[in-house]
Image (cartoon, rainbow, N blue to C red):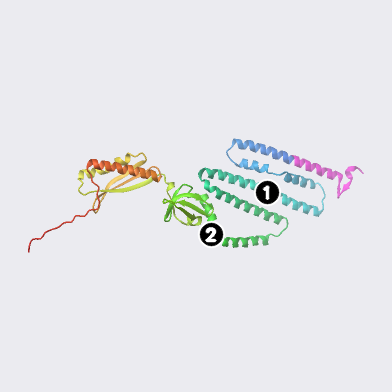
Amino acid sequence: MSVLQWEYLGNTAGAWLMAVLVGVIVYVGLRTVRGLVIRQLTSLSARTETEVDDIVAVALRRTKLFFLAFLSFYSATRVLLLPAQADVMLRYVGVVVIIVQAALWGNVIINSAIRRQMAQRMEEDAATATTVNAIGFISRLAFYTILILLGLSNLGIDITALVAGLGIGGIAVALALQNVLGDLFASLSIVLDRPFVIGDFVIVGDMSGTVEYIGLKTTRVRSLSGEQLIISNGDLLTARIRNYQKMSERRIAFTIGVTYQTPRSLIQRIPTMIREAVELQEDARFDRSHFATYGDFSLAFETVYYVLKPDYAVYMDVQQAINLEILARFEAAGIEFAYPTQTLIMQHGGAS
């Protein structure tokens, strides 16, 4: 009997030698393919702007040697005749190895997506980075939970009761923390929908101010009078929010009145004077000016113009310059502004 025909654990020495050879070939082949693919993706990522190839390359680098070793060992065992218990044990080990490796891959993908969002948010709104991190934590928690349940199911464990327990426990926790969870999901909605960002001037109900911080539970607004307003994110989603920072320009309407004693020739010139006063301002665009109505004590002129910048301070500077220019032109023309007056007419009757 030749050496290759010797039997050990139900397999000949030749079969054992073949198994070792298959294992070595598969391991070397997997490592070689892994290295070639990583180099190709790295070269490709340098020429493209998409991040998919970058993520795949990073995930492949996180492919651990124990995973490749297990695949090689499993390939080698297919050459051998193994007892049923050995196959069952091999299956259990394989489930654990695959779950661990899948967790590493998923963690790389989630982290890469979070880093990409963080880079974008930090340029526009640094405060939302906290919420983006919270999204990453929730995503990882959900991913790991699904992996664990899949692993337990493949190990032959009945997870029906476990899933039911998680569902009941989740409902209980959600009921107990419904306000906190409501604010948390409201925070996610604010980050994704972006109705406002840090620095925006907003009006929420009867409150107004500049947004200073967007957190997981609350948003903080600095009012015009200086105090900090803390508003829950859940309340923000149900409120009507007026965001003045989103304006590309600001529409302004104002009315001035002159006395009834003003001559008609001057009244006809007033809209032109106002128009010239508005057009002198670089950050203003004139719309219209008209003799609008007869007031109780004045002849009212209505003017509409647009401030080309949304900044409130710019608007006030423009309006002040317009008011001063109108005042100077009215003084030069001898036109008087009206103010509330009453005329008392007294009649003297004849002696009886």
Tell me the kind of residue under disc 2: Asn
Task: Give the class, few, some or many, for how many residues have Cα within 10 Å of label 2's Cα (few <14, many ≥20).
Answer: few
Instruction: Work out which quarter of the rendered image holds the N terminus and state it.
Output: top right
Indicate the position of residue 230 as horizontal and vertical percent values: 48, 54
Q: Is residue 338 above or below residue 173?
A: above
- Asked whether 196 or 286 is in front, the reply is 196
Whether 2 is among the magenta residues is: yes
Q: Secondary structure at mark 1?
A: helix
Disc nearer the start of the sequence (1/2): 1
**Residue 225 in the image: above or below residue 32:** below
Find out whether the residues at labels 1 and 2 contact each other: C-beta distance under 8 Å: no
Q: Which mark is residue 102?
A: 1
The image quadrant of residue 115 is: top right
Q: Is residue 315 left or right of residue 221?
A: left
From the viewer's perspective, is 128 left or right of 12?
left
- The amino acid type found where label 1 is placed reads Ala
Chief secondary structure of the magenta span? helix
Residues rendered magenta in the picture:
1-28
Depth check, front residue: 84 or 95: 95
Label 1: few (<14), some or many (≥20) within 10 Å?
some
Using the image, tell me which numbered label, if any, was put on residue 179.
Answer: 2
The picture quadrant where one finds residue 3 is top right
What residue appears at the point 59 percent right and 61 percent down from the top-left corner?
173
Total numbered labels placed on residues in the image: 2
- Badge 2 element: helix
Quadrant including the C terminus: bottom left
Question: Gap between marks 1 and 2, in whole Å?
Answer: 34 Å
Name the spot of residue 285 as percent of width and height, x first. 35, 41
Q: Nearer the viewer, residue 45 or 170?
A: 170
Residue 61 among those drawn in magenta: no
